Structure formats: structure tokens, C-alpha cells
Image (cartoon, helix red, strand yellow):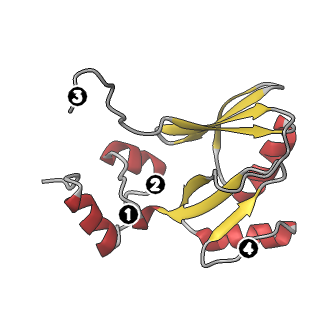
Amino acid sequence: MSDDKARAIGINHVGLEVGDIAEALAFYGQLFDFTMRSQSETDAFIDLGDQFIALFKGDDDAPDVGRHFGMVVDDPGKVRRKLEAMGVEIMNGPGVDFHDPWGNYWQMVTYDKIQFAKAPAVARAMGIDDIEKTEAAKREIAERGFAED
């Protein structure tokens, strides 16, 4: 570890640009159950346990291609069904990837398959303490030295 560089520790939040805050909250509210941290005409903050999404009013509707946001959800199938009911196009592939109305590229991933784990108190408060990690995720967590002793 270098003494002259800061250590990257994790993601605190993701910022997304949307055309209209109220419309964005209505759109995302059809897909996800979430808690608001705060909201104004120009921004909104959606809590994700110990992290958050920041929405900012902007005016660039060009769709993202490579840049994307990997949202951790408990059931991507529920997101897929809601998107289909809303008439939102889902990208080809095995997952649930889509562009929101403002061009932000979203990719749904499940908590059981990823390497990060919420602290026990956070997981309990979020009601996800009963989700068991897959063997592949457990292996990755152990290989990275993140497994609990």
C-alpha cells in the first residue's frame, strides 16, 4: 500500500442525471420499494441501507452505452415483470438490463451473487440478513480475504 495515495474503500453513492425529479421518482417507484432521504425540484436522494442514489436534474438525454449502474436487488424477475408492464425495453441477454427514460443504463444484480456483504446490523435493518450467498460468491469473498472468521 502506498503512503502517498488514498485507498479506495467503496461506493457511498451513485449519481444519475434525470430530466425531471418527480417523473424519475414516479418511474423508479414503480420498480423499487425505497426510502427517500430528501427531495427538491433539482435533486433527490434515495436510501439503499448504508448507501444511496443521488438523482440530479439535467438536460442530457443521450443514452449511456458502456457506463452503467449495477443495482443490487432481491429479485430481478420482479423488476423484469414491472419493466414489461411499463413498456420499457429490456436489453438482450440473460440479465435484466435497461435504459431509464433519461438514458441511464441500469443492470440488475442479486445480493446473493456479489462479493460485498452488508454489515450484520445493516443487513438486519434492511431485512436481507436471511439471504444466503452463493458458493461462488462465498469463494470470491474468501479469496479476497473478506470472509468472517
Disc 2 + disc 4, Cβ < 8 Å? no
Residue 130's mark? 1
Q: Position of residue 74 (x, y in %)?
A: 53, 64
Camera-side mark, 3 or 2: 3
Amino acid found under the numbered disc labelled 2: Gly
Looking at marks 3 and 2 on the same chain, the residue that comes earlier in the sequence is marked by 3
Label 4 element class: helix
Say if 134 sits above or below 19 in the image: below
Report the front residue among 35 and 103.
103
Question: Residue under circle 3?
Answer: 2
Marks 3 and 2, how far apart at CA: 38 Å
Marks 2 and 4, how far apart at CA: 22 Å
Amino acid found under the numbered disc labelled 1: Asp
Marks 3 and 1, how far apart at CA: 38 Å
User: With 58 as the anchor, is 121 left or right in this view?
Assistant: left
Q: Position of residue 8 (x, y in %)?
A: 36, 34
Q: Position of residue 102 (x, y in %)?
A: 82, 47
Residue 127's mark? 2
CA neighbours of label 1 inside 10 A, class few (<14), some (14 to 19), many (20+): few
Disc 1 + disc 2, Cβ < 8 Å? yes
Say if 101 sits above or below 24 in the image: below
At horizontal 48% and vertical 35% (from top left) the residue drawn is 12
